[in-house]
Image (tube, coloured by chain):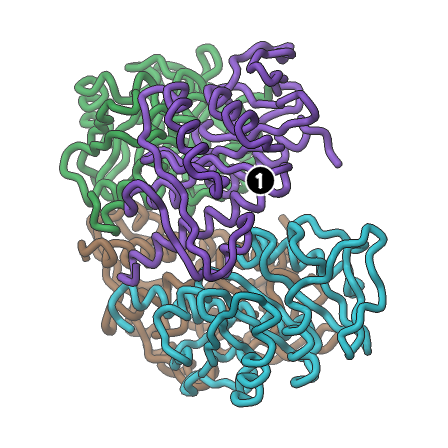
Chain colours: A green, B purple, C cyan, D brown
Amino acid sequence: MSSPRELICELSRQFYAQGWVSGTGGGISIRDGDTLFMAPSGVQKERLQPSDIFEVNFNGDVTRTPSDGGKLTACAPLFMNVFNQRDAGAVIHSHSQSAVLATLIFDTEFRITEIEMLKGIRATGYHDELVVPIIENTAEESELAETMAAAIDSYPQSDAVLVRRHGVYVWGNDWIQAKTQAESYDYLFSMAVEMRKLGIL
Amino acid sequence: MSSPRELICELSRQFYAQGWVSGTGGGISIRDGDTLFMAPSGVQKERLQPSDIFEVNFNGDVTRTPSDGGKLTACAPLFMNVFNQRDAGAVIHSHSQSAVLATLIFDTEFRITEIEMLKGIRATGYHDELVVPIIENTAEESELAETMAAAIDSYPQSDAVLVRRHGVYVWGNDWIQAKTQAESYDYLFSMAVEMRKLGIL
Amino acid sequence: MSSPRELICELSRQFYAQGWVSGTGGGISIRDGDTLFMAPSGVQKERLQPSDIFEVNFNGDVTRTPSDGGKLTACAPLFMNVFNQRDAGAVIHSHSQSAVLATLIFDTEFRITEIEMLKGIRATGYHDELVVPIIENTAEESELAETMAAAIDSYPQSDAVLVRRHGVYVWGNDWIQAKTQAESYDYLFSMAVEMRKLGIL
Amino acid sequence: MSSPRELICELSRQFYAQGWVSGTGGGISIRDGDTLFMAPSGVQKERLQPSDIFEVNFNGDVTRTPSDGGKLTACAPLFMNVFNQRDAGAVIHSHSQSAVLATLIFDTEFRITEIEMLKGIRATGYHDELVVPIIENTAEESELAETMAAAIDSYPQSDAVLVRRHGVYVWGNDWIQAKTQAESYDYLFSMAVEMRKLGIL
């Protein structure tokens, strides 16, 4: 397996091609033991280099700063929530237009059932109803931490939190599950939007 | 020609880029003589390696397991149906959003006529009406086997079966025909969805 | 510059990625002096090799057959029309969904004006109205030859002919102009379709 | 860092893949000290070579012509406006369909608020309303110079000018900020168009 630093760069290029992290937004954090690897703030995600990545401990302290300096991603407190509350191995934050549009056609919860792709989500079957909490966005990303923590607590079945007019946070036990779930959630958000366009949702 | 193992990996990367196999869903099986090559269950399709591929015989028994282990794809019984009922050389299973949306705007059969791309489908001309059966989805992929077998029998003209809210199975005499037909069907599903959005179907 | 054989392969891969030649449909023919280079019929366009290409003279006779054999593309008579009637250097045939949808929202002529991309079309300014004839499709591609020839004669200003529910033929003095115009026409077809979806055309 | 010539070629390939510069339209200009690097007119943007690039000074005079000749891009006077009025380090001109469609659903100003991606734009917060002036297109690109200059003066907060039925100009202090902002604006244009399709804007 590639190192966490290399993986973050490789996955960031892939997410960029999918429209999840354009305009330097969004990102991914991967955990290796007690070390959390996170990208810097405001950098072009498709051009990240392994040496650009920060290391952070479980208290949220930066333990290794890139030699080029830079500022830790503003998503750090939100990534920390997930690592601490869910013992996750990786967290993905996407600005996918499908995720944002999904928050505009649902109220406080995104709900969908009976789409095969539901099986891409942990402990979810075809006949289950998937429920993803939608929290309100705030002026600063760090201000989201409290309501996001509450949503994670209130929805123990969900491995994702949607943020209204902003995007989505998705996680998993490791980067593979986080990525698989991120793809599955995104497919379901897109499907809901397309169904609404066709007048069948 | 590449080996079946290499081909499955190469085509899986291509299908991933087309949105057919995201979230580890979907896949392809290729036959070589009496051996059926199939991917493992729940793996990232764009990252498959030739050594990950299972070999299965015509009774559905696994004759070669990857050294890394893994579990055979849950699609295996459905792939077996096609190999046995149609003497196919390859079967593709796609979760394409166009296929799923097509099952939501048609009842028990997808029907379309007079689109040039119909000629990409075996024994189908421009003025013919293409009919693809739509079967209902089930909680487990293996439970689909019976209704899918019946649909394959009932629709001898069709080289595809749509599964409601799930996706499509497409096959051909060899991987090239299977892939060509999968692309043609997908184009037709997408065209029907776009025509519906424009109010002309 | 690459040889015509290499160019056809390279452009076919590019057109495949754009959705113009999926399901083995569509293609490109390039002229070099008195020799017309054309792809075989029914092959995967993104996997063409230089040795797969036919050579044809201005009478439409095949002067060089690939060593692997194969059958000349069914588009040959239509490509011949353009080479003979317009002294073109290259002809592109696309099954782009935007082109097909455009033929479904217009009657016998596609018309659009005041879009900057019009300038990508020969002798067309921003305030000009672009008119592209739409001919009816036929059961066999070769049967199109007569009505297409008539449309080319009747619309000397147009470097494209749309075929209802089928696609478009676009040409230019050389492969660069043909490709630039094909991209510009496709953009305009797509724009018209999106404008219709938004209720503003 | 790559040289400005190499960067222009690399970014042009990336913009081509995003649909911003098809049909030879659109482009990018990068400043290095007192030298402005610009592409030639009417060339395929995904095939640009470093040796194709012109050098221009702040008076708009060409100081270095490619050995192959060619004609300077018709955007040059518009790029000059931005370099002179805003001390920009790079200017991007895109024909993105989202930008053009955005000019068709807004009157003289594109306005959007409360989308997280707003933070990708200089000095813009989530609760701010982004305002981008829309100027009317003209027959010749050079005729746009005057109204564009006036719009740049009238909207000191904006780092973009939309041109009706044409596209958008976006700039930044350097190529990275210009590109980040171009991606952010394009995302916002696309979001507005999708919201309109869903009947929620």
* In the foreground, D120 or D57: D120
Q: Residue at x 62, y 32 (%)?
A: B89
- In the image, residue C22 sits, relative to residue A67, either above or below, namely below
Q: Chain of mark 1?
A: B
Q: Answer with left or right where residue C68 lies relative to residue B129.
A: right
Circle 1: is it few (<14), some (14-19), or many (20+) Cα within 10 Å? many
Residue drawn at x 46%, y 36% as measured from the top left? B94
Q: Is residue C188 left or right of residue A125?
A: right
Residue D183 position, x and y percent, is: 42, 53
- Quadrant where the N terminus of chain A is found in the figure: top right
The quadrant of the image that shows the C terminus of chain A is top left
**Residue at 29 percent of width and 57 percent of height:** B197
Foreground residue among B12 and C163: C163
Q: Is residue A190 above or below residue A72?
A: below
Residue B5 lies, in percent from the top left, at 67, 26
Residue B1, percent across and down? 75, 36
Evaluate whether residue D64 shows in this view.
Answer: no
The secondary element bearing badge 1 is classed as helix
Residue A174 seen in render: yes
* Residue B61 or residue A16, whichever sits in front: B61
**Residue at which label 1 appears:** B178
* Residue A127 position by quadrant: top left
* Residue D144 in the image, given as x and y percentages of width and height: 41, 81
Residue type beneath disc 1: Ala
